[in-house]
Image (tube, rainbow, N blue to C red):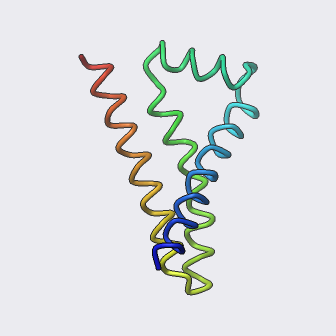
Amino acid sequence: MIKQILIGFIIGVIANLAGLYLYVYLFTDYEIEVALRLSYQDGFIGKLIALGAVLNFLPFFVFIKKKQDYRARGVLIATILSAILILISKIIDYV
């Protein structure tokens, strides 16, 4: 059970990072490092993380369809972690 949740969590984190990279690659002219630095300086790193988290829908629904509920739970935990990171970035920007 714990192993399946961990596998889902790792897949969720990888999907989030892949979504973030895919967005930067397709819609900006910057390299990933420059885009992350500029988004942090301009205060929209949270929005960039949220756009990356959209890709978590794919593994989540695949795991639900295959009745692998614990792996889907791991992806959900990774998505919640992304939301917490967005909240922290908003709090840091506010202060």
Q: How many marks on residues?
A: 0
What residue do we see at 54% from left, 79% from top? 64
Q: What residue occupies the far front of the structure in this picture?
A: 3
Residue 32 to residue 66: above or below = above
Above or below, 54 against 33 in this view is below
Q: Residue 92, how many percent across, how many down?
A: 31, 22
Q: Residue at image x 47%, y 34%?
A: 47
Q: Residue at x 37, y 28 (%)?
A: 89
Query: Residue 20 occupies which quadrant of the picture?
Result: top right
- 95 vs 35, left or right, is left
Nearer to me, 8 or 51 = 8
Tell me: residue 49, above or below residue 74: above
Q: Nearer the viewer, residue 7 or 55?
A: 7
Furthest-bottom residue in this view: 67
Q: Which quadrant is the C terminus positioned in?
A: top left
On screen, residue 69 versus residue 61, left or right, reads left
Q: Is residue 39 above or below residue 22?
A: above
- Counting from the top left corner in percent of width and height, residue 16 is at 58, 48
Q: Position of residue 53 (x, y in %)?
A: 53, 49
Q: Position of residue 21 (x, y in %)?
A: 69, 37
Q: Is residue 70 left or right of residue 94?
A: right
